[in-house]
Image (tube, rainbow, N blue to C red):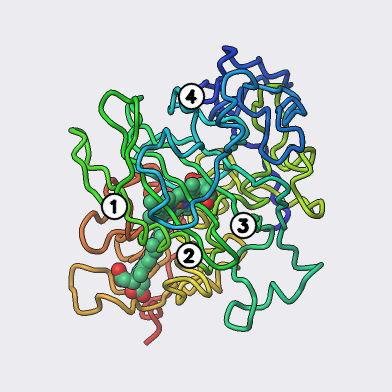
Amino acid sequence: MASIKISAALISVTCLLGCGSDGAPSPPASPSGGGNGGSSGGNVGGHAGDETSGGTSGVGGSGGQTGGSGSAATAGCQMSATDAEQPMLLSETHCVDMTDPTKPAAGLIPYDVNSPLWSDGAVKERFVSIPPGGKIHVKDCAMEPDTCAPADMGGSGADEGHWELPVGTVLVKNFSIGGKRIETRLLMRRNETTWKGFSYEWNDAGTEATRLSGELDKDLGTQVWHYPSSSQCLECHTKGAGRSLGLTTAQMNRDFAYADGMMNQVEKFQALALFDTAPTMIAGYPDPFGTAPLAERVRSYFQTNCSICHRPGGTLSDIDFRFTTPYEDMDLECTPIIRGTGDPLLPQVRLVPGSPEESSVSFRMHDVTTYRMPRIGSSVVDMAAVEMVDEWIAGMPAPAPDTCPPP
Ligand code: HEC
Ligand code: HEC
Protein backbone atom coordinates (compact mmCIF):
# COMPACT_ATOMS: atom_id res chain seq x y z
CA MET A 1 0.00 0.00 0.00
CA ALA A 2 2.75 2.39 0.90
CA SER A 3 4.05 2.52 -2.63
CA ILE A 4 0.95 3.89 -4.25
CA LYS A 5 1.81 6.74 -6.53
CA ILE A 6 -0.97 9.04 -7.32
CA SER A 7 -1.35 12.04 -9.40
CA ALA A 8 -4.09 13.97 -7.72
CA ALA A 9 -7.18 14.18 -9.81
CA LEU A 10 -7.36 17.49 -11.50
CA ILE A 11 -10.65 19.16 -11.78
CA SER A 12 -11.10 22.56 -13.21
CA VAL A 13 -10.44 25.42 -10.93
CA THR A 14 -13.37 27.44 -9.80
CA CYS A 15 -13.07 30.53 -7.73
CA LEU A 16 -15.62 29.47 -5.19
CA LEU A 17 -14.36 31.61 -2.44
CA GLY A 18 -11.20 33.35 -1.58
CA CYS A 19 -10.79 34.95 -4.94
CA GLY A 20 -9.43 38.01 -3.28
CA SER A 21 -10.80 41.47 -3.60
CA ASP A 22 -8.20 41.99 -6.25
CA GLY A 23 -10.25 39.90 -8.58
CA ALA A 24 -9.77 36.72 -10.45
CA PRO A 25 -7.33 34.04 -9.41
CA SER A 26 -4.01 34.15 -11.12
CA PRO A 27 -4.02 31.43 -13.71
CA PRO A 28 -2.03 28.50 -12.41
CA ALA A 29 1.21 28.13 -14.26
CA SER A 30 1.04 24.39 -14.10
CA PRO A 31 2.06 21.83 -16.65
CA SER A 32 -1.13 19.96 -15.97
CA GLY A 33 -3.10 23.06 -16.71
CA GLY A 34 -5.74 22.55 -14.07
CA GLY A 35 -6.47 23.24 -10.49
CA ASN A 36 -7.62 20.95 -7.79
CA GLY A 37 -10.83 22.72 -7.17
CA GLY A 38 -11.53 24.84 -4.21
CA SER A 39 -10.62 28.40 -3.81
CA SER A 40 -7.59 29.94 -5.24
CA GLY A 41 -6.27 31.74 -2.30
CA GLY A 42 -6.47 35.39 -3.08
CA ASN A 43 -6.42 35.84 0.64
CA VAL A 44 -3.39 33.89 1.51
CA GLY A 45 -1.33 36.95 2.15
CA GLY A 46 -0.89 38.24 5.64
CA HIS A 47 -0.90 34.90 7.33
CA ALA A 48 -1.46 35.31 11.02
CA GLY A 49 1.79 33.59 11.79
CA ASP A 50 3.95 36.07 9.98
CA GLU A 51 5.92 38.46 12.10
CA THR A 52 5.05 41.30 9.81
CA SER A 53 1.43 41.80 10.59
CA GLY A 54 1.20 43.96 7.53
CA GLY A 55 0.83 40.74 5.66
CA THR A 56 3.06 41.30 2.70
CA SER A 57 5.62 38.81 3.86
CA GLY A 58 3.91 36.46 1.63
CA VAL A 59 2.09 33.35 2.35
CA GLY A 60 2.43 32.46 -1.25
CA GLY A 61 4.07 35.80 -1.75
CA SER A 62 0.81 37.30 -2.78
CA GLY A 63 0.24 39.71 0.00
CA GLY A 64 -3.41 39.30 -0.96
CA GLN A 65 -5.75 41.47 0.96
CA THR A 66 -3.59 43.76 2.93
CA GLY A 67 -5.68 46.75 2.12
CA GLY A 68 -9.13 45.36 2.54
CA SER A 69 -9.27 43.71 5.88
CA GLY A 70 -6.91 45.35 8.26
CA SER A 71 -9.18 44.84 11.22
CA ALA A 72 -9.53 41.14 10.56
CA ALA A 73 -5.81 40.77 10.16
CA THR A 74 -5.20 42.52 13.45
CA ALA A 75 -7.68 40.58 15.52
CA GLY A 76 -7.14 37.39 13.62
CA CYS A 77 -9.20 34.26 13.40
CA GLN A 78 -8.92 33.11 17.00
CA MET A 79 -10.43 30.40 19.06
CA SER A 80 -12.87 31.39 21.76
CA ALA A 81 -11.78 30.51 25.28
CA THR A 82 -15.31 29.60 26.34
CA ASP A 83 -18.49 28.73 24.47
CA ALA A 84 -20.18 31.92 25.69
CA GLU A 85 -17.46 33.96 24.03
CA GLN A 86 -17.96 32.33 20.65
CA PRO A 87 -19.69 35.01 18.50
CA MET A 88 -23.25 34.34 17.38
CA LEU A 89 -22.60 35.89 13.97
CA LEU A 90 -20.06 34.42 11.61
CA SER A 91 -19.06 37.92 10.49
CA GLU A 92 -17.84 38.58 14.03
CA THR A 93 -15.55 35.58 14.33
CA HIS A 94 -12.67 37.22 12.41
CA CYS A 95 -12.42 33.96 10.49
CA VAL A 96 -14.25 35.52 7.57
CA ASP A 97 -14.00 38.92 5.94
CA MET A 98 -16.13 41.17 8.17
CA THR A 99 -17.50 43.09 5.23
CA ASP A 100 -18.25 39.98 3.20
CA PRO A 101 -18.54 36.81 5.29
CA THR A 102 -18.62 34.64 2.19
CA LYS A 103 -14.89 35.34 1.90
CA PRO A 104 -12.24 34.07 4.30
CA ALA A 105 -10.40 36.53 6.50
CA ALA A 106 -6.88 37.51 5.59
CA GLY A 107 -4.38 35.01 6.88
CA LEU A 108 -6.42 31.87 6.40
CA ILE A 109 -4.77 29.24 4.25
CA PRO A 110 -7.06 27.43 1.82
CA TYR A 111 -6.52 23.75 1.15
CA ASP A 112 -8.12 20.68 -0.34
CA VAL A 113 -7.91 16.96 0.43
CA ASN A 114 -7.30 13.91 -1.75
CA SER A 115 -10.14 11.89 -0.29
CA PRO A 116 -13.05 14.00 0.95
CA LEU A 117 -15.82 13.11 3.34
CA TRP A 118 -19.15 12.53 1.56
CA SER A 119 -21.39 15.37 2.67
CA ASP A 120 -24.68 14.59 0.95
CA GLY A 121 -23.53 16.17 -2.30
CA ALA A 122 -22.42 19.49 -0.83
CA VAL A 123 -19.49 21.37 -2.36
CA LYS A 124 -16.93 22.22 0.31
CA GLU A 125 -14.14 24.68 0.91
CA ARG A 126 -11.58 24.36 3.67
CA PHE A 127 -9.27 26.83 5.41
CA VAL A 128 -6.90 26.74 8.33
CA SER A 129 -5.77 29.53 10.63
CA ILE A 130 -2.56 28.81 12.52
CA PRO A 131 -1.95 31.13 15.50
CA PRO A 132 1.07 33.48 15.36
CA GLY A 133 4.26 31.54 15.96
CA GLY A 134 2.42 28.22 16.08
CA LYS A 135 4.06 25.16 14.53
CA ILE A 136 2.56 21.96 13.19
CA HIS A 137 4.06 18.70 14.38
CA VAL A 138 3.72 15.77 12.01
CA LYS A 139 3.42 12.29 13.48
CA ASP A 140 6.36 10.22 12.34
CA CYS A 141 6.63 6.63 13.52
CA ALA A 142 10.30 6.26 12.61
CA MET A 143 11.25 9.31 14.64
CA GLU A 144 8.89 8.75 17.57
CA PRO A 145 7.93 5.09 17.88
CA ASP A 146 6.13 5.79 21.17
CA THR A 147 3.39 7.87 19.59
CA CYS A 148 2.80 5.06 17.12
CA ALA A 149 2.18 2.39 19.74
CA PRO A 150 -1.38 1.02 19.67
CA ALA A 151 -3.89 3.49 21.08
CA ASP A 152 -4.57 1.31 24.11
CA MET A 153 -0.85 1.26 24.86
CA GLY A 154 -0.33 4.98 24.96
CA GLY A 155 -0.03 5.72 21.25
CA SER A 156 -1.93 8.68 19.84
CA GLY A 157 -4.15 6.59 17.55
CA ALA A 158 -3.97 9.14 14.75
CA ASP A 159 -2.57 8.10 11.38
CA GLU A 160 1.08 8.28 10.58
CA GLY A 161 1.59 11.66 8.95
CA HIS A 162 -1.17 13.24 11.04
CA TRP A 163 -0.63 16.98 11.47
CA GLU A 164 -0.82 17.87 15.14
CA LEU A 165 -2.03 21.46 15.06
CA PRO A 166 -0.94 24.02 17.64
CA VAL A 167 -3.30 25.21 20.37
CA GLY A 168 -5.28 28.14 19.00
CA THR A 169 -5.69 26.68 15.52
CA VAL A 170 -9.07 27.29 13.90
CA LEU A 171 -10.29 25.18 10.99
CA VAL A 172 -13.06 26.38 8.71
CA LYS A 173 -15.25 24.40 6.34
CA ASN A 174 -17.97 25.86 4.11
CA PHE A 175 -20.79 23.82 2.60
CA SER A 176 -22.84 24.78 -0.45
CA ILE A 177 -25.62 22.93 -2.20
CA GLY A 178 -26.84 23.95 -5.64
CA GLY A 179 -24.52 26.96 -5.52
CA LYS A 180 -26.11 28.18 -2.29
CA ARG A 181 -24.16 28.42 0.92
CA ILE A 182 -25.85 26.54 3.74
CA GLU A 183 -23.40 25.95 6.55
CA THR A 184 -19.98 26.99 7.89
CA ARG A 185 -18.27 24.85 10.52
CA LEU A 186 -15.50 26.04 12.81
CA LEU A 187 -13.35 23.57 14.67
CA MET A 188 -10.80 24.90 17.15
CA ARG A 189 -8.14 23.59 19.43
CA ARG A 190 -8.54 25.25 22.82
CA ASN A 191 -5.75 23.53 24.70
CA GLU A 192 -3.73 20.33 24.71
CA THR A 193 -6.76 18.14 25.19
CA THR A 194 -9.84 20.16 24.27
CA TRP A 195 -11.30 20.70 20.83
CA LYS A 196 -14.56 22.44 20.13
CA GLY A 197 -16.75 22.60 17.04
CA PHE A 198 -19.46 25.07 16.07
CA SER A 199 -21.97 25.12 13.27
CA TYR A 200 -23.22 28.34 11.64
CA GLU A 201 -26.39 28.34 9.58
CA TRP A 202 -26.47 30.68 6.59
CA ASN A 203 -29.49 32.91 5.98
CA ASP A 204 -31.45 32.62 2.75
CA ALA A 205 -29.90 35.74 1.31
CA GLY A 206 -26.44 34.28 1.81
CA THR A 207 -25.22 37.38 3.61
CA GLU A 208 -24.68 36.14 7.17
CA ALA A 209 -24.60 32.93 9.18
CA THR A 210 -25.73 32.42 12.78
CA ARG A 211 -24.34 30.01 15.32
CA LEU A 212 -26.61 27.13 16.21
CA SER A 213 -27.00 26.00 19.79
CA GLY A 214 -27.87 22.42 18.92
CA GLU A 215 -28.39 20.08 16.00
CA LEU A 216 -30.86 21.05 13.30
CA ASP A 217 -32.49 19.30 10.37
CA LYS A 218 -33.51 21.72 7.64
CA ASP A 219 -35.61 20.88 4.62
CA LEU A 220 -33.86 22.36 1.60
CA GLY A 221 -36.64 21.25 -0.73
CA THR A 222 -34.49 18.70 -2.48
CA GLN A 223 -33.04 17.11 0.64
CA VAL A 224 -32.93 17.45 4.39
CA TRP A 225 -29.66 18.97 5.59
CA HIS A 226 -28.32 18.03 8.99
CA TYR A 227 -26.43 20.63 11.03
CA PRO A 228 -24.52 18.67 13.67
CA SER A 229 -24.43 19.73 17.30
CA SER A 230 -21.11 20.52 18.96
CA SER A 231 -21.03 17.12 20.58
CA GLN A 232 -21.74 15.40 17.26
CA CYS A 233 -18.70 17.12 15.75
CA LEU A 234 -16.55 15.19 18.18
CA GLU A 235 -18.30 11.89 17.45
CA CYS A 236 -16.57 12.01 14.06
CA HIS A 237 -13.63 14.19 15.04
CA THR A 238 -12.69 11.43 17.42
CA LYS A 239 -9.80 11.44 19.80
CA GLY A 240 -8.71 8.16 18.26
CA ALA A 241 -8.36 9.80 14.85
CA GLY A 242 -6.59 12.88 16.22
CA ARG A 243 -9.55 15.35 16.27
CA SER A 244 -8.60 17.25 13.12
CA LEU A 245 -9.09 14.81 10.28
CA GLY A 246 -8.16 16.16 6.88
CA LEU A 247 -4.76 17.58 7.72
CA THR A 248 -2.50 14.59 7.23
CA THR A 249 0.35 14.26 4.78
CA ALA A 250 -1.51 11.59 2.77
CA GLN A 251 -4.53 13.89 2.44
CA MET A 252 -2.54 17.08 1.83
CA ASN A 253 0.01 15.71 -0.64
CA ARG A 254 -1.55 17.28 -3.73
CA ASP A 255 -1.34 20.49 -5.72
CA PHE A 256 -3.39 23.56 -4.99
CA ALA A 257 -3.94 26.68 -7.08
CA TYR A 258 -2.70 29.45 -4.79
CA ALA A 259 -2.87 33.09 -5.74
CA ASP A 260 0.75 32.96 -6.86
CA GLY A 261 0.44 29.73 -8.76
CA MET A 262 0.19 26.01 -8.36
CA MET A 263 2.10 24.34 -5.57
CA ASN A 264 2.07 21.13 -3.59
CA GLN A 265 0.27 21.79 -0.31
CA VAL A 266 2.83 20.07 1.92
CA GLU A 267 5.60 22.05 0.26
CA LYS A 268 3.58 25.22 0.68
CA PHE A 269 3.22 24.71 4.43
CA GLN A 270 6.92 23.93 4.57
CA ALA A 271 7.74 27.08 2.62
CA LEU A 272 5.66 29.05 5.11
CA ALA A 273 7.77 27.57 7.93
CA LEU A 274 4.69 26.14 9.59
CA PHE A 275 6.21 22.77 10.55
CA ASP A 276 8.46 22.26 13.55
CA THR A 277 10.38 19.69 11.48
CA ALA A 278 10.10 19.10 7.74
CA PRO A 279 7.76 16.12 7.35
CA THR A 280 8.56 12.89 5.55
CA MET A 281 6.54 12.75 2.35
CA ILE A 282 3.83 10.11 2.26
CA ALA A 283 2.04 9.11 -0.95
CA GLY A 284 -1.31 10.83 -1.34
CA TYR A 285 -4.49 8.81 -0.97
CA PRO A 286 -5.89 7.92 -4.36
CA ASP A 287 -8.93 9.85 -5.54
CA PRO A 288 -11.83 7.49 -4.71
CA PHE A 289 -13.37 8.28 -8.08
CA GLY A 290 -10.16 8.59 -10.06
CA THR A 291 -8.16 6.08 -12.01
CA ALA A 292 -6.33 4.08 -9.32
CA PRO A 293 -7.12 0.35 -8.99
CA LEU A 294 -10.57 -0.32 -7.54
CA ALA A 295 -9.42 -1.78 -4.22
CA GLU A 296 -7.22 1.24 -3.51
CA ARG A 297 -10.02 3.67 -4.30
CA VAL A 298 -12.39 1.78 -2.01
CA ARG A 299 -9.83 1.82 0.76
CA SER A 300 -9.27 5.53 0.30
CA TYR A 301 -13.01 6.12 0.63
CA PHE A 302 -13.22 3.95 3.76
CA GLN A 303 -10.26 5.78 5.26
CA THR A 304 -12.00 9.14 5.22
CA ASN A 305 -15.63 8.16 5.66
CA CYS A 306 -15.43 5.18 7.98
CA SER A 307 -12.06 4.86 9.72
CA ILE A 308 -12.62 7.98 11.82
CA CYS A 309 -14.87 5.79 14.01
CA HIS A 310 -13.87 2.29 12.96
CA ARG A 311 -10.25 2.09 14.07
CA PRO A 312 -8.38 1.15 17.21
CA GLY A 313 -9.29 3.81 19.75
CA GLY A 314 -12.32 4.92 17.71
CA THR A 315 -15.98 4.74 18.69
CA LEU A 316 -16.33 1.27 17.20
CA SER A 317 -13.01 -0.45 17.02
CA ASP A 318 -13.94 -4.03 16.14
CA ILE A 319 -13.71 -3.11 12.45
CA ASP A 320 -10.60 -1.34 11.15
CA PHE A 321 -11.20 0.75 8.03
CA ARG A 322 -7.84 2.52 7.94
CA PHE A 323 -6.15 2.71 4.56
CA THR A 324 -2.94 1.14 5.78
CA THR A 325 -4.55 -1.85 7.52
CA PRO A 326 -4.09 -5.05 5.51
CA TYR A 327 -7.41 -6.36 4.19
CA GLU A 328 -7.21 -9.53 6.32
CA ASP A 329 -6.92 -7.41 9.45
CA MET A 330 -9.97 -5.27 8.81
CA ASP A 331 -12.21 -7.91 10.43
CA LEU A 332 -14.74 -7.77 7.65
CA GLU A 333 -14.53 -10.87 5.50
CA CYS A 334 -16.85 -13.66 6.66
CA THR A 335 -17.09 -12.06 10.10
CA PRO A 336 -20.56 -12.23 11.68
CA ILE A 337 -22.10 -8.90 12.62
CA ILE A 338 -22.34 -8.03 16.28
CA ARG A 339 -25.14 -5.46 16.14
CA GLY A 340 -28.64 -6.00 14.82
CA THR A 341 -28.24 -9.76 14.85
CA GLY A 342 -31.91 -10.25 15.66
CA ASP A 343 -33.09 -8.31 12.60
CA PRO A 344 -33.82 -10.56 9.61
CA LEU A 345 -33.63 -7.56 7.26
CA LEU A 346 -29.99 -7.04 8.08
CA PRO A 347 -27.31 -9.16 6.39
CA GLN A 348 -25.71 -11.19 9.16
CA VAL A 349 -22.16 -11.11 7.82
CA ARG A 350 -19.99 -8.01 7.47
CA LEU A 351 -18.62 -8.93 4.06
CA VAL A 352 -19.37 -11.97 1.93
CA PRO A 353 -16.94 -12.05 -1.01
CA GLY A 354 -18.79 -12.00 -4.33
CA SER A 355 -22.08 -10.98 -2.72
CA PRO A 356 -22.84 -7.34 -1.87
CA GLU A 357 -26.47 -8.32 -1.06
CA GLU A 358 -25.32 -10.52 1.78
CA SER A 359 -22.76 -8.00 3.07
CA SER A 360 -23.61 -5.73 5.95
CA VAL A 361 -21.02 -3.18 4.79
CA SER A 362 -22.95 -2.64 1.59
CA PHE A 363 -26.34 -2.69 3.33
CA ARG A 364 -25.22 -0.09 5.86
CA MET A 365 -24.12 2.30 3.13
CA HIS A 366 -27.42 1.89 1.22
CA ASP A 367 -29.59 2.32 4.27
CA VAL A 368 -31.11 5.68 5.19
CA THR A 369 -32.86 4.57 8.36
CA THR A 370 -31.52 3.31 11.66
CA TYR A 371 -28.67 1.32 10.16
CA ARG A 372 -27.23 4.20 8.15
CA MET A 373 -23.44 4.50 7.93
CA PRO A 374 -21.84 6.93 8.53
CA ARG A 375 -23.97 7.11 11.59
CA ILE A 376 -24.39 10.87 11.77
CA GLY A 377 -24.34 13.78 9.41
CA SER A 378 -25.62 12.07 6.29
CA SER A 379 -29.07 11.18 4.99
CA VAL A 380 -28.33 10.99 1.26
CA VAL A 381 -26.78 7.80 -0.11
CA ASP A 382 -23.47 8.32 -1.88
CA MET A 383 -24.49 6.37 -4.98
CA ALA A 384 -21.11 6.54 -6.68
CA ALA A 385 -19.49 5.18 -3.53
CA VAL A 386 -21.91 2.32 -2.90
CA GLU A 387 -21.63 1.28 -6.53
CA MET A 388 -17.87 1.28 -6.16
CA VAL A 389 -17.99 -0.76 -2.94
CA ASP A 390 -20.52 -3.20 -4.43
CA GLU A 391 -18.34 -3.65 -7.51
CA TRP A 392 -15.37 -4.32 -5.24
CA ILE A 393 -17.23 -6.95 -3.19
CA ALA A 394 -18.84 -8.52 -6.30
CA GLY A 395 -15.42 -8.92 -7.88
CA MET A 396 -14.04 -11.02 -5.03
CA PRO A 397 -13.95 -14.78 -5.52
CA ALA A 398 -16.90 -16.43 -3.76
CA PRO A 399 -16.04 -18.46 -0.67
CA ALA A 400 -16.46 -22.21 -0.50
CA PRO A 401 -19.92 -23.32 0.66
CA ASP A 402 -20.54 -23.08 4.41
CA THR A 403 -17.32 -21.24 5.14
CA CYS A 404 -18.63 -17.70 5.29
CA PRO A 405 -19.05 -17.21 8.16
CA PRO A 406 -17.14 -20.24 9.32
CA PRO A 407 -19.43 -22.70 11.13
C1 HEC B 1 -19.90 12.28 9.80
C2 HEC B 1 -18.68 12.65 10.47
C3 HEC B 1 -18.42 14.13 10.74
C4 HEC B 1 -19.19 15.00 11.48
C5 HEC B 1 -20.49 14.74 12.19
C6 HEC B 1 -18.46 16.25 11.47
N1 HEC B 1 -17.31 16.15 10.75
FE1 HEC B 1 -16.01 17.63 10.33
N2 HEC B 1 -14.97 16.38 9.07
C7 HEC B 1 -15.18 15.02 8.95
C8 HEC B 1 -14.15 14.45 8.10
C9 HEC B 1 -14.01 12.97 7.73
C10 HEC B 1 -13.31 15.52 7.71
C11 HEC B 1 -12.05 15.45 6.83
C12 HEC B 1 -12.38 15.23 5.38
C13 HEC B 1 -12.92 16.42 4.67
O1 HEC B 1 -12.58 17.57 5.00
O2 HEC B 1 -13.69 16.23 3.69
C14 HEC B 1 -13.85 16.71 8.35
C15 HEC B 1 -13.30 17.98 8.24
C16 HEC B 1 -13.70 19.08 8.96
C17 HEC B 1 -13.05 20.36 8.92
C18 HEC B 1 -11.77 20.66 8.18
C19 HEC B 1 -10.62 20.34 9.12
C20 HEC B 1 -10.42 18.88 9.41
O3 HEC B 1 -10.54 18.45 10.58
O4 HEC B 1 -10.14 18.12 8.48
C21 HEC B 1 -13.73 21.17 9.78
C22 HEC B 1 -13.44 22.62 10.07
C23 HEC B 1 -14.80 20.41 10.33
N3 HEC B 1 -14.78 19.14 9.81
C24 HEC B 1 -15.66 20.90 11.30
C25 HEC B 1 -16.71 20.16 11.85
C26 HEC B 1 -17.62 20.68 12.85
C27 HEC B 1 -17.50 22.04 13.51
C28 HEC B 1 -18.55 19.72 13.06
C29 HEC B 1 -19.77 19.81 13.96
C30 HEC B 1 -20.60 21.00 13.82
C31 HEC B 1 -18.20 18.58 12.22
N4 HEC B 1 -17.07 18.89 11.51
C32 HEC B 1 -18.90 17.40 12.16
C33 HEC B 1 -16.20 14.32 9.53
C34 HEC B 1 -17.24 14.85 10.28
C1 HEC C 1 -19.61 8.49 13.58
C2 HEC C 1 -18.94 7.22 13.73
C3 HEC C 1 -19.12 6.20 12.62
C4 HEC C 1 -18.81 6.35 11.29
C5 HEC C 1 -18.26 7.58 10.59
C6 HEC C 1 -19.08 5.09 10.65
N1 HEC C 1 -19.56 4.21 11.57
FE1 HEC C 1 -20.10 2.26 11.23
N2 HEC C 1 -20.69 2.08 13.17
C7 HEC C 1 -20.58 3.05 14.14
C8 HEC C 1 -21.18 2.58 15.37
C9 HEC C 1 -21.26 3.36 16.68
C10 HEC C 1 -21.69 1.27 15.10
C11 HEC C 1 -22.47 0.37 16.06
C12 HEC C 1 -23.93 0.81 16.12
C13 HEC C 1 -24.71 0.32 14.94
O1 HEC C 1 -24.69 -0.89 14.69
O2 HEC C 1 -25.32 1.12 14.24
C14 HEC C 1 -21.34 0.98 13.71
C15 HEC C 1 -21.63 -0.22 13.06
C16 HEC C 1 -21.19 -0.55 11.78
C17 HEC C 1 -21.32 -1.87 11.18
C18 HEC C 1 -21.91 -3.11 11.85
C19 HEC C 1 -20.81 -3.91 12.52
C20 HEC C 1 -21.35 -5.11 13.28
O3 HEC C 1 -20.53 -6.01 13.54
O4 HEC C 1 -22.54 -5.18 13.63
C21 HEC C 1 -20.81 -1.79 9.91
C22 HEC C 1 -20.71 -2.90 8.88
C23 HEC C 1 -20.36 -0.41 9.73
N3 HEC C 1 -20.59 0.29 10.89
C24 HEC C 1 -19.81 0.08 8.56
C25 HEC C 1 -19.47 1.42 8.37
C26 HEC C 1 -19.03 1.95 7.09
C27 HEC C 1 -18.92 1.17 5.80
C28 HEC C 1 -18.80 3.28 7.30
C29 HEC C 1 -18.37 4.32 6.30
C30 HEC C 1 -19.17 4.42 5.08
C31 HEC C 1 -19.06 3.57 8.70
N4 HEC C 1 -19.47 2.42 9.30
C32 HEC C 1 -18.90 4.82 9.29
C33 HEC C 1 -20.00 4.29 14.00
C34 HEC C 1 -19.59 4.86 12.78
The span from disc 2 to disc 4 (Cα, nearest Å) is 29 Å
Q: Which residue is mark 2?
A: 238
Q: Please name whichever residue, 201 or 280, is drawn nearer the observer in this view of the structure.
A: 201
- Neighbourhood count class around disc 4 (C-alpha, 10 Å): few under 14, some 14–19, many 20 upward: some
Tag 3, which secondary structure?
loop
Tag 1, which secondary structure?
loop
- Counting from the top left corner in percent of width and height, residue 373 is at 34, 59
Q: Which residue is mark 3?
A: 167
User: Which badge, 2 or 1, is on the more N-terminal residue?
Assistant: 1
The span from disc 4 to disc 3 (Cα, nearest Å) is 29 Å
- Neighbourhood count class around disc 3 (C-alpha, 10 Å): few under 14, some 14–19, many 20 upward: many
User: Which badge, 1 or 4, is on the more N-terminal residue?
Assistant: 4
Residue 78 placement: quadrant: top right
Q: Amino acid at mark 1?
A: Ser
The span from disc 3 to disc 2 (Cα, nearest Å) is 17 Å
Q: Amino acid at mark 3?
A: Val
Q: Amino acid at mark 4?
A: Leu
Q: Amino acid at mark 2?
A: Thr
User: Which badge, 1 or 3, is on the more N-terminal residue?
Assistant: 3
The span from disc 1 to disc 4 (Cα, nearest Å) is 28 Å
